[in-house]
């Protein structure tokens, strides 16, 4: 976990790194088409009243499957290798989108088709969420997890903006099923690249386990830093994520016509914010730990949701959409910065980054379908602004409570160090969040820091305690 004051390295990217980022861009453009097509089809099937609920059912089913499959990502990576697991997940996802799109174009019922595809798509995302971070870090030859993920966000942000605008315009004039079909050809370059081109940095094969769920729970039970990081991830995906996942029914609730076109513009604005994530991450890492900075970013993103809700109360039509687009950019910055810092905090909380991500994501993605379903019900039976007010308030409250716990823990650690005599015994129980942020569970405790060394590891404001 990056400490306050650390300088985040930014190694020069080589052709292999650019190849991975470039093919990732193509894949994300295709995924933007696919998600817009699926959300548009579900919203159209539900109509003005149930469109948000139908879309949230599809997304929640996908997220629930992602939660169930996440621990098995570590198992698959241990048996096939990290690169192969990533390629398998991407190929299966592309095939599922293709078949679902063909079924919609053939006239099969919309919701049954989407609900059959959703568990497959979610399972692929579950595996991908575990191994993508390690794959991206290896291809970029980076030694900083949060920064490599944030730099990946630049590529994904550019691609998301292109896919959002192009997909919104195209799907306003063609059948939604074509949005799902286009995912497959645009995913092929990434699948082929990962399968054939090895990164210059070796990818260690995770230790395979026969009991992935019990191993994941054990990792959470024995690692306090991991448990605190889960709060950041859960609040981000449950209260902030639905704004992006349900952007089509949100645009429909704002009475924008066509809703898919407006949703594409909003997706492009979120993606533009994602592009700024690397700079925001580097700024945050110089001032606080990954975890503390991520909690602050999550609380600020929640505040922007409340601002968006207030705008929906006083503005209407195109002016409302224009202001939404403007505020969606800083919201995207904060949301994806919190996501990158969460991943960095989790990956660096123990010696096995893949196992750490499997343990954390198992709990985090369980919160996703709950938050998404609640958000969809709010859109279907309430007003957009009410749903935004509630989501924003929950995000602020949960993140600020965690910030308070981190600061309290830091002050308690400072008191323990002050009472400890030189050469005295140290506490070898669970690692403290700020005292030994990179210490793996079960490793030998490092010597007690003193003076400036100890203060440099505390979050901002703790030095005055």
Image (tube, rainbow, N blue to C red):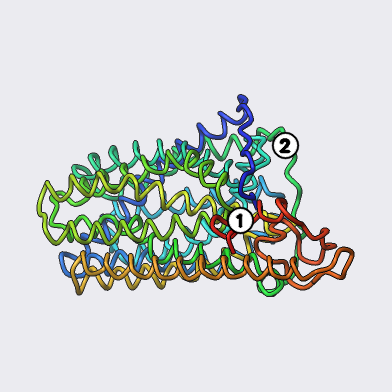
**Is 244 on the left or on the right of 16, as rendered?**
left
Residue 251: x, y in percent?
Answer: 21, 55
Tell me if label 2 and label 1 are in contact, CB under 8 Å: no
Q: Residues within 10 Å of mark 2 (few under 14, many from 20)?
A: some
Residue 155: x, y in percent?
Answer: 47, 36
Q: Total number of numbered labels?
A: 2
Residue in the picture at 48% in, 40% down: 187
Residue in the picture at 48% in, 66% down: 234
Quadrant position of residue 329 = top left
User: Residue at label 2?
Assistant: 201
CA gap between label 2 and label 1 equals 21 Å
Q: Residue 15: tell me if it is visible.
A: yes
Residue in the picture at 41% in, 73% down: 370
Per the image, label 1 sits on a secondary structure element best described as helix
Quadrant position of residue 217 = bottom right
Residue 239, relative to residue 102: is it above or below? below
User: Residue at label 1?
Assistant: 345
Residue 350: x, y in percent?
Answer: 72, 59
Residue 45, relative to residue 247: is it above or below? below
Q: Residues within 10 Å of mark 1 (few under 14, many from 20)?
A: many
Residue 137: x, y in percent?
Answer: 63, 42
Instruction: Identify which residue, 322 or 205, lies in the foreground.
Output: 322
- Where the C terminus falls, by quadrant? bottom right
Per the image, label 2 sits on a secondary structure element best described as loop
The residue sitting at the right extreme is 423
């Amino acid at each position: 976990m990056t400490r306050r004051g650390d300088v985040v390295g930014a190694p020069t990217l080589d052709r292999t790194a650019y190849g991975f980022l470039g093919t990732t861009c193509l894949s994300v453009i295709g995924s933007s088409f696919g998600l817009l097509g699926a959300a548009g089809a579900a919203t159209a099937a539900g109509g003005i009243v149930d469109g948000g609920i139908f879309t949230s059912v599809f997304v929640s089913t996908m997220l629930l499957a992602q939660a169930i499959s996440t621990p098995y990502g570590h198992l698959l990576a241990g048996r096939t290798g990290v690169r192969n697991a990533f390629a398998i997940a991407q190929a299966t996802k592309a095939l599922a989108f293709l078949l679902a799109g063909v079924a919609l174009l053939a006239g099969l019922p919309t919701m049954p088709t989407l609900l059959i595809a959703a568990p497959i798509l979610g399972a692929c995302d579950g595996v991908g969420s575990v191994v993508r971070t390690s794959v991206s870090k290896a291809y970029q030859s980076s030694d900083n997890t949060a920064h490599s993920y944030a730099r990946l966000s630049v590529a994904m942000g550019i691609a998301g903006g292109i896919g959002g605008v192009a997909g919104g315009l195209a799907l306003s004039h063609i059948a939604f099923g074509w949005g799902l079909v286009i995912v497959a050809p645009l995913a092929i370059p990434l699948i082929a690249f990962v399968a054939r081109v090895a990164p210059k940095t070796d990818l260690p094969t995770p230790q395979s386990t026969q009991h992935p769920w019990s191993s994941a729970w054990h990792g959470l039970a024995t690692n306090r830093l991991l448990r605190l990081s889960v709060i950041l991830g859960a609040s981000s995906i449950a209260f902030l994520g639905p704004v992006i996942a349900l952007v089509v029914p949100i645009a429909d609730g704002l009475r924008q016509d066509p809703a898919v076109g407006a949703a594409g513009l909003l997706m492009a604005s979120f993606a533009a914010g994602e592009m700024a994530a690397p700079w925001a991450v580097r700024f945050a890492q110089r001032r606080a730990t990954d975890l503390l900075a991520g909690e602050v970013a999550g609380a600020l993103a929640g505040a922007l949701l409340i601002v968006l809700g207030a705008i929906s109360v006083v503005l209407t039509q195109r002016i409302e959409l224009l202001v939404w687009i403007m505020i969606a950019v800083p919201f995207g910055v904060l949301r994806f910065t919190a996501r990158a810092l969460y991943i960095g905090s989790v990956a660096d909380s123990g010696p096995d980054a893949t196992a750490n991500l499997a343990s954390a994501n198992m709990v985090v993605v369980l919160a996703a379908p709950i938050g998404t379903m609640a958000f969809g019900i709010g859109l279907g039976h309430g007003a957009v602004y009410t749903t935004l007010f509630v989501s924003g308030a929950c995000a602020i409250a949960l993140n600020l409570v965690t910030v308070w716990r981190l600061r309290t823990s830091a002050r308690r650690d400072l008191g323990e160090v002050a009472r400890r005599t030189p050469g005295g015994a140290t506490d070898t129980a669970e690692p403290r969040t700020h005292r030994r942020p990179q210490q793996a569970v079960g490793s030998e405790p490092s010597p007690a820091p003193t003076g400036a060394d100890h203060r440099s590891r505390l979050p901002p404001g703790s030095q005055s305690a």
